[in-house]
Amino acid sequence: MIITKQKPLEDIIEMVAKYKHLFYVGCGQCSTQCQTGGEWEIEELSRLLEEEGHRTSGSTVVYAPCHELDTKRHFRKHKEQLARTDAVIVMSCGAGVQSAVEGTDLPVFPSNDSLFLGNSQRHMHFEEKCSTCGECVLQWTGGICPVTRCPKGLLNGPCGGTNHGKCEVDSDRPCAWTLIYERLESLGELDMFRKIQPPKNYAAVKRPGLMREEVR
């Protein structure tokens, strides 16, 4: 899931300052989990902006606003409210914001900052474990990603700074390569640990990414 945090209220107030009537788009998945774009957060943000003189023309929570066709469907459903709208505030990650841009000619603004692709450990506890680097190495590391979980991104570790299983960059953080070693040892696969990996192919991920496949 995409982990987000809400922008400072003063930043949101500044970006919509000249727009009177606002329509809010929430996210039923990631932003709801992060408490940055569910129904309650829409209600709260609209209340705060109404105190600044804005008016709420309507709102909707798209289950997955990164799905452009679904976002457009919601816009068609609320076309009368959008006809009375001056600007749209999207309370999701940047992908949802850009889906909204594809679905309306109105100005579209983000209420959130997108932080990272994260795993949910428990309620409101998130950890980055994947960097979407384009060339996965988890088959060699016991399913633990050194590209993301090692601050140095080492493909052959550990480095000389590890100390009693802790990372030299952050002594509260377990060394990723210690975790990898312990995992491979428990699997009886320590031969993988001893295998030298070639340098990371950073060209494997291209920006902006694009993948289109024909439906057969």
Image (tube, grey):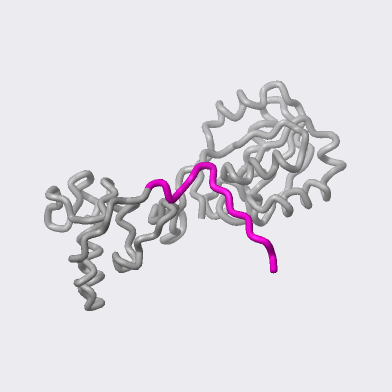
Asked whether residue 167 is drawn in magenta, I would say no
Residue 119 position by quadrant? bottom left
Residue 163 horizontal side relative to residue 207, left or right: left
In this view, which residue lies farthest toward the bottom? 188
Q: Residue at x 25, y 70 (%)?
A: 183
Q: Residue at x 64, y 55 (%)?
A: 64
Where is residue 192? Give x, y as percent: 23, 69
Residue 45 horizontal side relative to residue 84, left or right: left
Residue 102 horizontal side relative to residue 123, left or right: right
Q: Residue at x 64, y 41 (%)?
A: 98
Q: Can residue 137 be seen in the rendering of this structure?
A: yes
Q: Is residue 179 above or below residue 73?
A: below
Where is residue 12? Give x, y as percent: 60, 30
Asked whether residue 208 is drawn in magenta, I would say yes
Q: Can residue 125 be seen in the rendering of this structure?
A: no
Where is residue 46? Give x, y as percent: 68, 37
Magenta span: chief secondary structure: loop
Where is residue 59? Give x, y as percent: 74, 44
Residue 2 horizontal side relative to residue 136, left or right: right
Magenta-colored span: 202-216
